[in-house]
Image: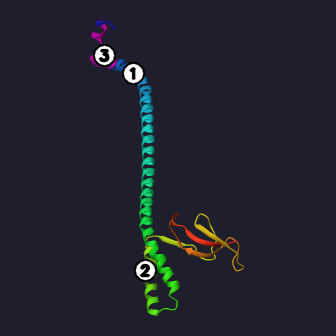
Amino acid sequence: MSEKNKAEIPEEEIQAEQTVEEVEAEAVDAEDIPDERDEKIGKLEAELAAQKDRYMRLAAEYDNYRKRTANEKLGIYDDATSKAVTEILPVADSVRMALENLKDSDPEIIKGVELIKSQLDRSFEKLRIESYGEVGDEFDPNLHNAISMVDSEELKSNQIAAVFQTGYKIGDKIIRHAMVQVVN
């Protein structure tokens, strides 16, 4: 538009004309904005996915660490308990042998030795110590140490005929293997 024509047009229309031009310019710019937004959104989503992946890996790693340390703690407890109990086992064996050999003794002496045996058994129970290796049990080379073999009509083949030393374990850990005599 020429200057003369602009002078004849009221000012409001000139501003409206400028506004339309500005709007058209902004519309051209607005067409570029969605592409930029999509790119930004894509980048942010990728960054979020990477952060989420790192977080999940960290959480899994921590969970594995927690489980591993709990197992190690339990293993250390079992090892310490088994070492301490190993020193007490000869006393338990002596009490068992005393009860076997005191059959004709004074009833008060037998009662006292039985009391000692029951106290030892309760202590072992509190420490999760289990005894094993009874006559008639199935022989297991992982648990029992076979000292000799014997023929028996009363017991089946591969059963324990006699126990010379009781075996002890804590959980799956063997503290001492049972020494036994096995039927052929």
* Residue that numbered label 2 is attached to: 119
Q: How far apart in space, not on screen, are marks 1 and 2 (Cα)?
A: 90 Å
Crowd around label 2: few <14 · some 14–19 · many ≥20 (10 Å): few
> Measured from the top left, where is residue 81 in percent x and y?
42, 66
Q: How far apart in space, not on screen, are marks 1 and 3 (Cα)?
A: 23 Å
Q: How far apart in space, not on screen, are marks 2 and 3 (Cα)?
A: 108 Å
* Residue that numbered label 1 is attached to: 29
Kindly give the residue lying farthest to the right in the view shown: 153
Q: Nearer the viewer, mark 1 or mark 2?
A: 2
Determine the main secondary structure of the stretch shown in magenta: helix
* Residue that numbered label 3 is attached to: 14
Is the N terminus in the top left, top right, bottom left or bottom right quadrant? top left
Q: What secondary structure is found at the residue carrying circle 2?
A: helix
Q: Residue at x 45, y 34 (%)?
A: 46
Three-letter amino acid code at disc 3?
A: Ile
Q: Determine whether 115 is above or below 74 in the image.
A: below
Residue 88 visible? The answer is yes
